[in-house]
Image: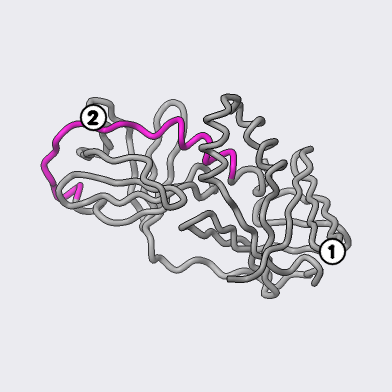
């Protein structure tokens, strides 16, 4: 899966797997190492934020909306969701929780991000682009969200803007969060960090990208 649709699909997955933690816990030295603010990833896709508080409670947010609150615990290399636990590792400000179905990666906030490398860039693609409503609906359909109310709620959460910069950095902005990737764009070919090449065209204020067989349309928006 290429980066453009992966960002949206991962958020859909997040909304269906966030647990409801509900057990009072006592803070330990092991838990103290986890206390703080983290960015939540599914694979390499930034999905939400989570903050673990010293009193054993947490709050998770996505695009400015609180999507989960509760209590948490950790002991002997196991991260607990109430009575359910999953093994975890914590190394170099990366917390990885892995169960039988998925791997959830949390990276501590305020850790400097890697800078992008020099890349060939088509000036026509530079600037800020927002995904169209039609393309958003197509992505939600691919994520198997069919209920009208669910689609409306997900679309409200997932307004997403791609900011292509002249220094070769693409900032993917999703509400309160921002993730950066290196990119190159020239001769109708767009590539991003760790992704396959995609075809693109720019026609005035419309950007069209063919990503994983899906045609995504963006419209240009003014800088804030």
Q: Are marks 2 and 1 in contact (CB under 8 Å)?
A: no
Residue that mark 2 sits on: 82
Q: Nearer the viewer, residue 205 or 182?
A: 205
Q: Can you say whether 62 is above or below 81 in the image?
A: below
Compared with residue 100, is residue 63 higher up or lower down, i.e. above or below?
below
* Visual colour scheme: one colour
Looking at the image, which residue is at 13% across and 46% down?
A: 27
User: Which x, y percent locates residue 61?
Assistant: 38, 48
Give the extent of the magenta segment: 8-31
Q: Which residue is mark 1?
A: 204
Image quadrant in which you'd find residue 221: bottom right
Rendered location of residue 148, percent (x, y): 58, 28
The residue closer to the viewer here, 91 or 57, is 57
Q: Residues within 10 Å of mark 1 (few under 14, many from 20)?
A: few
Q: Quadrant of residue 105?
A: top left
Q: CA distance from mark 2 to mark 1?
A: 53 Å
**Label 2 secondary element:** loop
Q: Is residue 67 above or below residue 186?
A: above
The answer to which of 162 and 93 lies nearer the viewer is 162
Q: Foreground mark, 2 or 1?
A: 1
Compared across the picture, whether 148 is left or right of 192 comes to left
Q: Quadrant of the C terminus?
A: bottom right
User: Looking at the image, is mark 2 or mark 1 earlier in the sequence?
Assistant: 2
Rendered residue at 86%/58% (across/down): 188
Secondary structure at numbered mark 1: loop
């Amino acid at each position: 899966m290429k980066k453009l649709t992966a960002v949206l699909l991962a958020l859909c997955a997040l909304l269906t797997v966030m647990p409801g933690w509900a057990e009072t816990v006592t803070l330990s030295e092991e838990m103290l190492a986890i206390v703080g603010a983290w960015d939540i990833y599914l694979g390499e896709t930034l999905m939400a934020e989570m903050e673990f508080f010293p009193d054993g409670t947490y709050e998770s947010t996505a695009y400015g909306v609180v999507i989960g609150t509760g209590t948490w615990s950790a002991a002997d290399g196991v991260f607990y969701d109430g009575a359910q636990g999953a093994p975890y590792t914590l190394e170099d400000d990366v917390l990885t929780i892995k169960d039988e179905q998925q791997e959830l990666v949390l990276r501590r906030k305020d850790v400097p991000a890697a800078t992008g490398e020099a890349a060939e860039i088509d000036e026509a693609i530079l600037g800020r682009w927002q995904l169209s409503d039609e393309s958003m609906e197509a992505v939600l359909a691919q994520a198997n969200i069919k209920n009208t109310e669910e689609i409306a709620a997900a679309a409200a959460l997932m307004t997403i803007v791609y900011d292509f910069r002249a220094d070769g950095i693409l900032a993917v902005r999703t509400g309160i969060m921002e993730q950066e990737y290196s990119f190159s764009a020239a001769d109708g070919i767009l590539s991003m960090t760790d992704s396959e090449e995609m075809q693109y065209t720019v026609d005035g204020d419309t950007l069209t990208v063919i990503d994983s067989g899906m045609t995504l349309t963006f419209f240009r928006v003014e800088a804030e």
